[in-house]
Image (tube, rainbow, N blue to C red):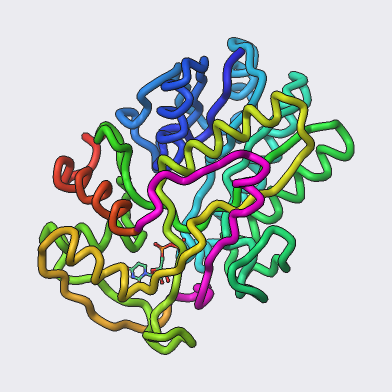
Amino acid sequence: MAVLVTGGAGYIGSHAVAALAERGEEIVVVDNLQQGHRDAVTGGKLYVGDLRDADFLETVFKENKIDSVIHFAANSLVGESMTLPGKYYHNNVYGTLCLLEKMIEHNVLRIVFSSTAATYGEPENVPIDEFDRTLPTNAYGETKLAMEKMMKWFDVAHGLKYVSLRYFNAAGAHPDGKIGEDHSPETHLVPIVLQAALGKRPHISVFGEDYETPDGSCIRDYIHVSDLAEAHVLAVHRLRSGADSAIYNLGNGQGFSVKEVIDIARNVTGREIKAVIEPRRAGDPAVLVASSDRARKELGWEPKFASLEDIIRSAWGWHLANPEGYAKG
Ligand code: UDP
């Protein structure tokens, strides 16, 4: 039986595919390659197409014996979602609806979902736990919350069991250097800082230094992408063992400000990284830090890369070896 990984050619998806392949799992990858890279898929069979294409999805489910799905395929940029919310509702929410309906049709009743800390919005408590209020401050987070709720009602009606993994800020690259982070355009803090270190950008823009944080810049909880990938494998195992649906935060439990990230990157790379203060980016909460106690207890998840220095060092290795990212096409 195969695990279907949607969005398996993307940044986190490709690391999950690698983690599944390392365990000898049979893998089927679906990706429309809008953001993903063919070269990032290091295991399984790749189908290039879109979840919203009914004939395409039917072919994938007909040609393979799928017992579980890990669902990454989605747009995921906070800033873009504030100017193009329709794109997020269409691809994320409608795409998920197409997937869930196909799963029910083929009696595939297990799904691990790539969710986000953006579902919480401005937190009531720090660190955030899974029972805290969800009130997204951006359209991206709102669509991910809608996708989670859709799964809940499919559970009630059809017995679909889901594990939703709400990640905080993914960063880093596979320890063996074969895959890493390459978005186009790049909007995430760590890769942009490293591109500045490589001289591919003149500077890093710090979006806001008037937040209510010690140095005024936003605080986030950075987690290594291979640790995230591992949590997906554990979640598939948990669902296969008959566990009920659940939601888990995935983070390190420690927050770093944008300015601290830049300082650590300066130390790791030994390069000068120029920082320029700019206005706030729409939709950004001031502080997002996770309590991942539930994932540790129930999934047996134990992140291996606890320090931000190690996370940035692994990302730097990928950027140095692949300054242009993956080969195009
Ligand atoms: N950020 C920044 N400059 C950049 C990119 C990001 O100051 O060029 C900030 C952003 O405002 C947020 C944090 O870095 O506070 C992390 O942003 P990212 O886009 O990496 O992840 P997000 O938290 O949006 O998922």
- Is residue 34 in view from this perspective? no
Q: Where is residue 241 in the image (x, y as percent from the top left)?
A: 72, 25
The magenta segment is 281-307
Q: Indicate left or right for 239 with 268 as reference.
A: right
Q: Does the magenta stretch include residue 18?
A: no
Residue depicted at 30% across the width and 46% down the height: 182
Q: Position of residue 140 (x, y in %)?
A: 57, 59
Q: Is residue 145 above or below residue 180?
A: below
Question: Nearest the camera: 13 or 235?
Answer: 235
Looking at this rendering, what residue extends furthest in the right direction?
157
Question: Nearest the camera: 94 or 61?
Answer: 61
Question: Nearest the camera: 288 or 326?
Answer: 288
Q: Position of residue 172 (x, y in %)?
A: 33, 48
Q: In which quarter of the image is the N terminus?
A: top right
Q: In which quarter of the image is ligand 1?
A: bottom left
Residue depicted at 59% across the width and 60% down the height: 291
- Is residue 211 in view from this perspective? yes
Q: In this view, does 7 lie above or below 23?
A: below
Q: Indicate left or right for 269 with 131 as reference.
A: left
